Amino acid sequence: MSGKILIVDDQFGIRILLNEVFHKEGYQTFQAANGIQALEILTNHSPDLVLLDMKIPGMDGNEILKRMKQIDPDIKVIIMTAYGELDMIQQAKDLGAITHFAKPFDIDDIRSAVRKYVPVQSS
C-alpha cells in the first residue's frame, strides 16, 4: 500500500504540479482547494502527510492545521508559504507542522522531504 498525500492549495496549477510529481513517485494523492475540502478528505481518507499552503481564502493555513490536528493529532503536515512570513511559519510549527517550504519552492526539495516522512513502498 502506497503512502497517501493530501495537497491543499487554492492555486490549481500548484495542486496539479504536486499531484503529478507525487503520483509518479507512487503515492496515492488527494487534492483540496480549501479548508472544508481538506478536512473532509482528512476525515474520510486518513492521508499520511499533508502539503498545506498557508494563504488560502476563507480559512487560512493555521486554522486548517489546527483543525486537522484536532481530527488526527499525529497527522504530518508540511507547510508551503510565501517567502518571509516568519510569524505564520512559527505559529504553524507551534501547531505541529514538521517543516516548511517558501514559494517558489524547488520541487526536488519537497520530494525529498515527503520521502523522508512517508517513504515510497515498493509493491
Image (spheres, rainbow, N blue to C red):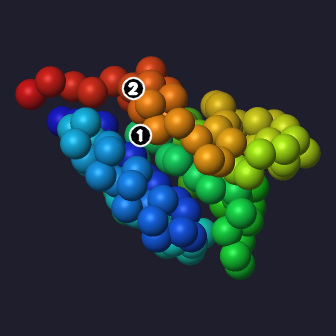
Secondary structure found at label 1: loop
Where on the picture, by quarter, is residue 77? Answer: top right
Question: Quadrant location of the C terminus?
Answer: top left
Q: Position of residue 47 (x, y in %)?
A: 40, 47
The residue shown at (22%, 42%) is 24
Please say whether residue 113 is visible from this viewpoint: yes
Circle on res. 19: none
Q: Residue furthest bottom?
A: 58
Write down the residue under mark 2: 115
- As drawn, is 49 to the left or to the right of 57? left
Q: Is residue 106 above or below residue 80?
A: above
The residue shown at (54%, 69%) is 11
Q: Residue furthest left?
A: 123
Label 2 amino acid?
Arg
Of 37 and 105, nearer the camera is 105
The residue shown at (46%, 38%) is 107
Question: Quadrant location of the N terminus?
Answer: top left
The residue shown at (67%, 68%) is 56
Of 92 and 67, nearer the camera is 92
Of 49 and 102, nearer the camera is 102
**Label 1 Cα crowd, 10 Å radius (few <14 / some 14-19 / many 20+):** some
Of 25 and 45, nearer the camera is 25
Write down the residue under mark 1: 48
- As drawn, is 109 to the left or to the right of 123? right
Secondary structure found at label 2: helix
- As drawn, is 113 to the left or to the right of 58? left
First-in-chain label (1 vs 2) = 1
Label 1 amino acid?
Asp
Q: Is label 1 in contact with label 2 (beta carbons under 8 Å)?
A: no
Q: Position of residue 110 (x, y in %)?
A: 50, 34
